[in-house]
Image (spheres, coloured by chain):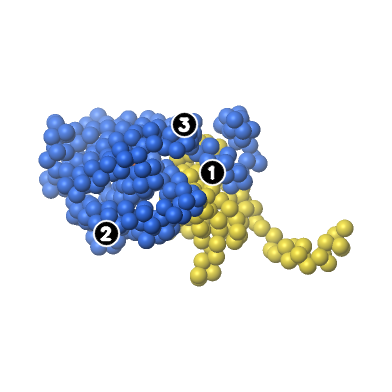
């Protein structure tokens, strides 16, 4: 079964991609959504702050959106604080950005 | 009610380790964020124990007021008076929009917004009293920016005309992004009590402007023929928006980079919506 899969060019393209890192999210003091959703968001803390590979800024409300998985182009995310839906895209400089989907 | 909603209730305080909001389907997501329950649990998170928008321990005297210089205090009074004008416009605009909203989830969301806007008006009036203003209504009349009053009149005309998409643009996209930008710039330099009040207000405004952009975005995706007409209304209101920003920046004595920050959010939103 495994051997068959590795000779399939489509499956191979997927399986040769680096496996995604996963993250254990902790509550970062974000209080703007009901408890269950809180660990999936945090506030940007200014110049000395940095984004992890599982984090991205909401283009609408500028809150940091967090995922349990490392983000990749094509991932879909929700910003609950401002009710936006977006997809992860590659920015011109090669970094990850988001595009709002209405 | 979807199973997601049932599990939300059950999981409150006992989060399901497998739960991932990014995996929701769009309909469940929209039902969730437009609900009164979502609003209630969200505001409870950041407004509890903050009567009039700031922590109770700080309330025994008009905190922060004694540290303000005379001209600083005067500018703050003018700014707060104009926030009251903006919040009254938002309160009247959002309440009028409930009647013309095309669906149930928009009506429910707008009802939560009406409660938010009433609270904003109340906390700013309360802060004016902290600053020694015995009759805030008279002070607001005296200090209101005439351009903001024109904007308010035009917004309420659009709401009264029953034009949902134009009202949504003027109220939940333009007015909300003006307010959010002004509060953000102001909070960076405000006294601690005013900054805390503004911080709580901005958390609410995030929902309002997000609702506006996303609902209008969906409407334009379904009815692209509306775009040119709405771009025209944006063009008509643009002069007022810029004049309001400019006057607010003068009142707050902001530097050049902060002035640019104030207008950026508005321009980026228009760009995403294709209203250029
Ligand atoms: Fe408001
Ligand atoms: Fe608002
Ligand atoms: Zn957002």
Are discs 3 and 2 less than 8 Å apart at CB?
no
Ligand 3 within 8 A of label 1's CB?
no
Chain letter for the part of the structure drawn in yellow: A
Question: Label for residue B259?
Answer: 2
- Considering only vertical position in the picture, is A14 above or below B122? below
- Residue B192 visible? The answer is no
Please tell me which residue is depicted at 56% across the width and 58% down the height of the picture: A88
Please tell me which residue is depicted at 27% across the width and 41% down the height of the picture: B157
Q: Position of residue A15 (x, y in %)?
A: 75, 62
Q: Nearer the viewer, residue B232 or B19?
A: B232
Chain letter for the part of the structure drawn in blue: B
Q: Position of residue B257 (x, y in %)?
A: 28, 62
Q: Nearer the viewer, residue A100 or A75?
A: A100
Question: Label for residue B36?
Answer: 3
Subunit under mark 3: B
**Residue under numbered circle 1:** A39
């Amino acid at each position: 079964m495994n051997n068959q899969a590795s000779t399939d060019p489509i499956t191979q393209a997927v399986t040769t991609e680096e496996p995604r890192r996963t993250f254990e999210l902790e509550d970062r003091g974000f209080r703007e959504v009901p408890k269950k959703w809180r660990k999936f968001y945090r506030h940007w803390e200014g110049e000395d702050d940095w984004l992890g590979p599982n984090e991205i800024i909401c283009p609408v409300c500028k809150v940091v959106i967090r995922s349990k998985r490392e983000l990749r182009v094509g991932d879909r995310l929700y910003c609950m604080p401002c009710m936006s839906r977006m997809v992860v895209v590659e920015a011109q400089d090669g970094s990850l950005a988001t595009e709002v989907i209405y | 009610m979807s199973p997601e909603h049932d599990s939300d209730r059950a999981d409150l305080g006992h989060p399901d380790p497998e739960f991932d909001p990014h995996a929701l389907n769009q309909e469940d997501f929209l039902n969730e964020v437009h609900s009164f329950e979502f609003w209630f649990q969200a505001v409870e998170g950041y407004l509890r124990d903050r009567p009039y928008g700031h922590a109770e321990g700080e309330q025994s005297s008009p905190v922060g007021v004694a540290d303000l210089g005379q001209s600083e205090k005067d500018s703050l009074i003018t700014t707060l008076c104009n926030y009251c004008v903006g919040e009254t416009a938002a309160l009247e605009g959002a309440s009028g929009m409930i009647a013309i909203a095309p669906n149930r989830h928009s009506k429910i969301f707008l009802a939560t917004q009406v409660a938010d806007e009433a609270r904003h008006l109340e906390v700013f009036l309360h802060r004016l009293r902290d600053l020694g203003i015995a009759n805030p209504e008279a002070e607001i009349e005296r200090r209101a920016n005439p351009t903001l009053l024109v904007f308010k009149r035009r917004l309420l005309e659009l709401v009264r005309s029953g034009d949902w998409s134009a009202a949504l643009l003027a109220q939940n996209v333009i007015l909300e992004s003006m307010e959010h930008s002004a509060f953000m710039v102001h909070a960076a330099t405000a006294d601690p009590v005013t900054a805390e009040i503004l911080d709580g207000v901005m958390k609410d405004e995030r929902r309002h402007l997000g609702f506006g952009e996303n609902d209008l975005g969906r409407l334009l995706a379904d009815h692209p023929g509306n775009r040119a007409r709405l771009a025209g209304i944006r063009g008509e209101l643009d002069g007022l928006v810029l004049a309001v920003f400019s006057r607010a920046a003068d009142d707050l004595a902001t530097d050049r980079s902060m002035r640019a920050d104030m207008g950026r959010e508005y321009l980026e939103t228009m760009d995403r919506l294709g209203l250029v």
